[in-house]
Amino acid sequence: MKKAILVDGYIDEPAALGVPPYISPYIRYIYGALKREGFDVTYKTIDQIREENLWSLESDILVIYGGTTVPGHYLSGTPILLSEIKKLVTNSKASVKIVSGPVARSYTIRGGTVSTVPKIEGAITVDGDLWAFLPQFFKGETTPDIKDTYELVDELAQFGAYLIKDHPGFPNVICEIEVSRGCERAIFCSFCTEPIMHGRLRSRNIKGILREIEALCKAGCKAYRLGRSANILAYMAEKNGFKIDVQAIKDLYMGIRQVCPDLEVLHTDNANPAFIVDNLPESIKAIETVAKYNTPGDILSFGAESFDPKVIKMNNIGSPPEKVKKAIKIVNEIGGYREDGIPKLLPGINLLYGLIGESEKTYQINYEFLKNVLEEGLLLRRINIRQVMVHPGTPLFRYYQTRRFRIKKKLFQYWKEKIRKEIDLPMMKRVFPKGTIIKGAIPESKKGKLIYARPLETYPVLIGTYSKIEGKSDMIVVDHGSRSLTGVKFPFDINKASFEELSSIEGIGNARAREIILKRPFKSLQDMERRLDAATFQALKPLVEKSQEL
């Protein structure tokens, strides 16, 4: 049997994520295509390659897939670099070497930059759907820009389901599920690569999605995100006059629950705020369906990008501020209730800088919009603030071909920090008030005694803790940062908590932590109240009460 090495270089696109703990659908399709062709496939992530120094893997065929088209910050993995791709290709003795994914079209790793078309000598670069290209390639056809069909995807997705068992994070992984490709809008945003790669909206058949999830469930996956979609609420809209198909969305969510009844996470990603407002009251019914069948902590990410009318117009952004605000209110009203202490479904906001028509006034306008959202008591689960990546084929790329592309770094950083401090921090305190229990946090990295953990979610919240945790652990919130939480292991035992755990609790600090340790053990809440000062007792009371350790 011929051997294939499949290197997962991770992807991050406008509507698809494949950086751990996420596993992209594309890498599973490719695995399925190789399996169907009879290959013995060895799957390795780029992080495994780095950690194990596996730069000279022996195989008959080497396949590398990865690349990013949107900027991101990652905790559990780092997308492949062009230099690493070249190193793998150069060192490999495989007779066939193939490189594909976003990196085959354009390459950059930072926001605020213009990408370039990479040159990779010694490899076939496939700018297209590799899983569709491979069967044709093995038949002797070498056209590299073959576009797949969903019939093929549905078949390969089932072949590729068992790849997840070879992922180093298994079983603590979340599978990105493809629901649709392209955008429902007739006029696309100036910066977006989605229409370049996929064009107008094309939805995947529900039966194929459910068969894939059923196969993944049998393989051991318990967490899913319907992320490979530019707008989850537009599922099947192209067959409904580009209007919301409420029944299709209900059938999708109900079907997922039926084929994987013991799932632990069912989340989504993108939604179009203007599409929500323009499709009332059907959008309300659709959002109610999502909130009914999902799991707590879900997000509908709104690609608002800017609230400056000039920027919106010059970049063909389809969501004016008034529609974004109305959509935020709608999602809050429907999904803002708490289940297991966590809001069921909240909106998220994406802001993008480096767009046509941008000025210093843009930063002020964006800040004022978010401040107004905060003052109205509305909840946002997260705010993404990014610098645009400029990719060939986009109107933004053509615009900057005749102009200098430059983002004022100091200005960007000033307003970013201002939003983090004055908007994000109070918002985090509202969404995750002290005493909130976060279930199933998984440790991902460590800095000294401080462990960073996240639950399996869409845009999972980062938790810093001094508690000793090794596997999935429930955490209770004790303090807040603008983008993260401080937690201690739940249930919390005041008589066993370490000095570091105690001092990390808001309102305690080092001096009071020492006092608590000297006065331990405590027999009851009444004993605590009698022996500790009022401020210390009030800081500890909700944690002890929820933990019922005394």
Image: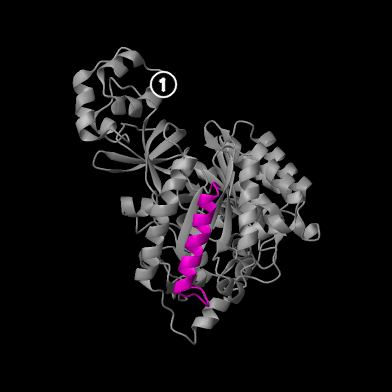
Q: Mark 1: which amino acid?
A: Glu
Which residues are drawn in magenta? 354-379
Q: Few, some or many C-alpha atoms within 10 Å of disc 1 (few <14, some 14-19, many ≥20)?
A: some
Q: Is residue 518 left or right of residue 472?
A: left
Q: Is residue 144 left or right of residue 460?
A: right
Residue 69 shows in this picture: no
- The percent position of residue 542, horizontal first and vertical second, equals 40, 26
Circle 1 residue: 545
Q: Is residue 178 left or right of residue 519?
A: right
Q: Nearer the viewer, residue 93 or 502?
A: 502
Q: Which residue occupies 41% across, 48% down?
A: 425
Q: Which corner quadrant holds the C terminus? A: top left
Q: Is residue 347 magenta?
A: no
Query: In the picture shown, does residue 384 fall above or below 260?
Result: below
Q: Which residue occupies 37% across, 17% down?
A: 549
Q: Which residue occupies 46% across, 60% down?
A: 385
Q: Nearer the viewer, residue 151 or 169?
A: 169
Determine the residue located farthest toward the top in the rendered image: 523
